[in-house]
Image: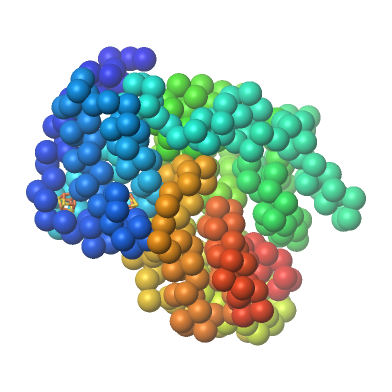
Amino acid sequence: MNEEHSLENLIDKLSDTITRCRGCMQCYTVCPLVESTHGFPTQGARGILRAILYGIRWDEVLGTEDKNELRDIVYACTTCAACEIKCKSSGAGVPIVELIEDGRKLLVEGGVGPLENQRIALKSIESLGNPYAAASESRLDWLKAFSERRRLSCKVVPDDRNVDLLLYVGCTASYDESIQKVACSLVTLLEEMKINYGVLKEERCCGSPANRAGERRIFSDTSAENAKRFEEYGVKHIITISPHCYNTFVNEYPELMKKIKIQHYTEFLSDMMEEGALVPQKELGKRVTYHDPCYLGRRNNVYEAPRRVLKSIPGLVVVEMKRNRQDSLCCGGGGGRMWAAVEEVTRLSQIRLREAMEVNAEIIATGCPWCHIQLEDAVKDTNNEDKITVKDIAELVAEAL
Ligand code: SF4
Ligand code: SF4
């Protein structure tokens, strides 16, 4: 670990930066945790930051139980960044999410973090290249199965490196049966546009779950290996299905990734539609609302491309929920929370579903596998399958061809 990232520097940075917080509690007003847990035990961003600070100051006197309590507070955050945007507009500009993730790094260094299920997921990333304990050699099974149903021109890199575009599928769309259909829809669109594209033969996790959990070593090994592989294979342009892979490649990967054009697939589809290369024809005749994934919207300012794509589908009426774009409500699945059981009075995904139903949407569209899973669970858990459906934007465009 270099000097800049040493434990002492991390502690100094946290101690100095957290004290920039002025205690205005603006962050509290937008924190989804406050809404779903009714403020116990997390108390929003300021509460989490204070907990980290006290943890640093009292490290030597804290017992195991106190440390576990501190861990639960710090790992409850979804890293949705709603607080950070509010803090910035209030003038204080505390880099809250970075500090919370740095706090997690400290807990990992101290052997207190991450949470048990996150440890299992991270071990799986190290040994199998995915957090789902799935066999690495079955990663492309969804593609093999799809190619039995239709003829595909998809290349497998590096067996054939001559591609203009690499589809980085990601772990969830590769392994989760309910999300594989999103990958198939996107492949259908790439075929329709006659793109010279491919997927990686040995794709591995982007490493985002490790970074969210504060596991620097696993992230650093994973990102270095992936970036080296992209460079070696001469990759020029990547589209991702998950906003989490997108965010990690764009903001957290080594410098050498800067030579590669990286887009979330909704940005790519929007560009293709603008060029006239993709024209949805079929009327869908549905009322749809778009749920902004935190890692696409607030974290990367991609708000309009997904909406442009939806609005290009004939017969689709696009309506906004009361909280949209930078005010969108987190689904509860980010920040490593896919592997964390946080006790909530009402699940965030169910609050979000209610907001979609308030505007009489028949479809909640999203562009994130984890939002998709969270919202779909909310639909099932509240027995609303006959009223509303969750769809990925790629699925809707493919249906409209
Ligand atoms: S909004 Fe910013 S300055 Fe205000 S309490 Fe929250 S973290 Fe502190
Ligand atoms: S990032 Fe989101 S969940 Fe975490 S403290 Fe801020 S508002 Fe709350």
Farthest-out residue, left: 22
Q: How many labels does the image show?
A: 0
From the viewer's perspective, is residue 5 above or below residue 280? above
Quadrant in the rendering for residue 269 = bottom right
Quadrant in the rendering for residue 200 = top right
Which of 50/362 is in front? Answer: 50
Residue at 27%, 26% (x, y): give it: 63
Q: Decide if residue 11 is on the left or right side of residue 198.
A: left
From the viewer's perspective, is residue 121 above or below residue 366? above
Q: Decide if residue 1 is on the left or right side of residue 7.
A: right
Q: How is the image coloured?
A: rainbow
Quadrant housing the N terminus? top left
Q: Decide if residue 23 is on the left or right side of residue 375.
A: left
Residue at 43%, 44% (x, y): give it: 335
Residue at 45%, 35% (x, y): give it: 115
Which of 320/376 is in front? Answer: 376
Residue 346 percent location from the top left of the image:
43, 64
Residue 262 percent location from the top left of the image:
52, 44
Quadrant housing the C terminus? bottom right
